[in-house]
Amino acid sequence: MTDAPTTTYDEFLCAKMCVAQASGFVVDPAILNPWLAPHCKAIVPWALAGGRRAIFASFGLHKTSMQLELLAQVKRATGEPTLCVTQLGCRDEFFDDAGPQRMGLTVKFIRRAEEIDPAVDVHITNYETVRDGKLDPRLFAGASLDEASCLRSYGSKTYQEFLPLFADVPYRFVATATPSPNRYKELIHYAGFLGIMDTGQALTRFFQRNSEKANDLTLYPHKEDEFWLWVSSWAIFIDFPSDLGFSDDGYILPPLNVRWHEISSNHASATVERDGQGALFKNTARGVIEASHEKRDSLGARVDKMAEIIAEEPAAHRILWHSLEDERRAIEGRLPGVKSIYGTLDLEEREDRVRAFKTGQSQFLPTKTELSGSGGNLQRHCHKHLFLGIDYDFNDFIQAIHRLLRFGQRHPVDLDIIYTEAEREIRRELEAKWDRHIEQRAKMRAIVKQYGLNHAEIAASMQRSIGVERIEAAGERYLVARNDCVLEAQRLAENSLGLIVTSIPFSNHYEYTPSYNDFGHTDSNAHFWGRWTS
C-alpha cells in the first residue's frame, strides 16, 4: 500500500455505522400548510430533509395530507412535477379526506404522460398504471408510494421489478400504516426502494436464515438493537401523536369487539395421512391442501352463520371479507343485489362500487383483503366487519380490520370471525401473530419516544458500540491480550513478531459481536481492506 491514508481508524469505525444519510433539503416550518396537524408539521420537515424517507403512521394520522404536502414542497423547490401512487379505490382519499382544496393545493389523477400538467401541485395515479408501463416515474422529481404494502398482492417478482423504476427519482417517500414489524422483508424492500441500503446487503448484515424454510428471517440477537435504530434513521413509526410529544386529543381509537364463531367440521371427509392411514379428524394445520378442502366443505355452513349474524342487525352496513370465488358467489346468492369486488371486475366499476359503499349507498361490500384491505377509509357509514373464513396471513388481516378501526370512527368496531373446528390451529397462530405485532410496534414506539426525529441522537447511540476494553494476561514466556487486533498491532514494536497465525472472516458475512471494531462489520471487500492510519 503506497498511498497515504485518507482517514483515521476512528473515522473508519464511525463510518461503519449504518445510519441513513440525508439527501433532501431544509424547509422553513413557517411555510408549511397551516391546515396540517401538529405531528404532521414535525414529520414533513424531517422527511424533506432526509429526501428519501418512510412514514409508518397509524390509521387516521393523516398520511394522505402529509404526502400531499411533501410532494407539493418538492414541486415548489424543484419546479418539476410530482407523483403519488395509490391503489384502486383509494384515489378519492386524495380528493376528499385530505382536503386539498382546504390546503390550497391542486391535485390531478392521470394515467399517461400526456396528462401531466405543469401547473398542478401533485399528480395521482394507481399502481396498475405504473406496473403496466403506461406512466414513467422518471418524469417526476418526487414520488410517494401510498400503502405500498399492497404491492405484495401482485407477487414478489412484480414487487422486485417495481422498485427500480423509481431509482432515478430524486425525492422518494413511502407512507403506509402498518408494515408489521414482524415482516422484515417488507421493511428491507422499503429501504431498497428509498435507496437506503441494498436488499441483499441488509439481509447479510442483520439476519440469519433458515436453510430449511425460504424467507424465514431471524435477526441476529446481537444485531437487533442496531437493526431497529437503523430503521429509525429513515422511517418513523407513530401510533399516536403523543409518540412525538403532541396531544392525543381527537386521536383515541374506539373499542374493538371481537367475536369468534366456531362451526363444526365434517370429519367424515377427513383426508388420508402421509403414511397412507386414514385420518380420524380434519386438521388444517397439516397443509394448504387440507385447509382448502376444509374451506370448500364448510362453505354452506359458514354462509349460514354469516346470514345468522347479519340477521342480528339487518339494517347495519358490513364489509364481508372472503378469500374464494365460490365464497363470493355464495354471498351473492344469499344476498340478492349485492355488488361484490373481484379481480376481473372492470377497474372503473370497481372504484364505483367502493365509492357507493363509502358514501352509504350500498349496505354490503363483499371483497377480498388483497383487493380492498389496504389504504381505503371505509368507516364513514360502517363499523362492522365479517370474515367468512380465516387463514395464516396476518398482515392482510390486520390491514383489513383498520379499514374501519381508525381515528375518526364514531362507533365501537364489531369484528365477527367465522372459522371451523378444524381451523383452531389457524386461529391460535393468528392470535399469536397479533400479540407479536403489538409487542414489536410497542418496541418501535419506545425508540420514537426516546429519540424522536433526532437523527444525531440515533447516530450517537449507535456509536456506543465502538470500542473494546483491553484485557491482558501475561506470564514468564507469554502475553495474551483481548483487543481490537488493529489497535493491538499498533502497540507492537517494529519487527517484534516472528509468526502471525490468523483467520480473517469474510468481508460482508459474519459479524460475531455488536462492536463495530469487529472485522465482520464491513460492507464489501473494498471496505474491508480500507486504508487506516498506522
Image (spheres, grey):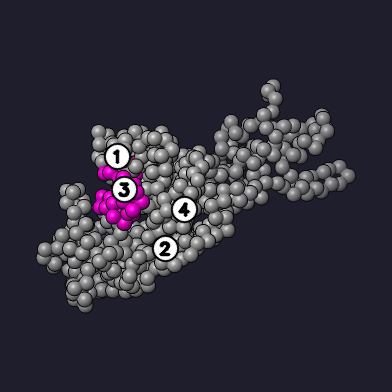
Disc number for residue 86 = 3
Between the C-alphas of marks 2 and 1, the distance is 33 Å
In which quadrant is the C terminus drawn? top right
Measure how far apart labels 3 and 4 are at the Cα level.
Answer: 23 Å
Q: Amino acid at mark 3?
A: Thr
Mark 1 element type: helix
What's the amino acid at mark 2?
A: Lys
Residue placed most toward the observer, 356 or 333: 356
Location of residue 166 (image quadrant) = top left
Q: Is the residue marked by circle 2 packed among few (<14), some (14-19), or many (20+) residues within 10 Å? A: some
User: For residue 94: magenta?
Assistant: yes
Q: Secondary structure at mark 3?
A: strand
Distance CA(mark 1)–CA(mark 3): 10 Å
Please identify the quarter of the rendering in which residue 532 is found: top right
Which residue reaches farthest top?
2
Is 367 a magenta residue?
Answer: no
**Is any part of residue 227 visible from this angle?**
no
Specify the quadrant of the image occupied by residue 79: top left
Mark 2 vs 4, N-terminal side = 4
Q: Pointer 4: what residue? A: 41
Quarter of the rendering occupied by the N terminus: top right
Closer to the chain start, of discs 2 and 1, is 1
Compare marks 3 and 2 and give the one earlier in the sequence.
3
Give the residue pinned by disc 1: 130
Q: Alpha-carbon distance for marks 2 and 4? A: 33 Å
Give the residue at mark 2: 433
Residues at marks 3 and 4 touching, judged by CB atoms closer than 8 Å: no
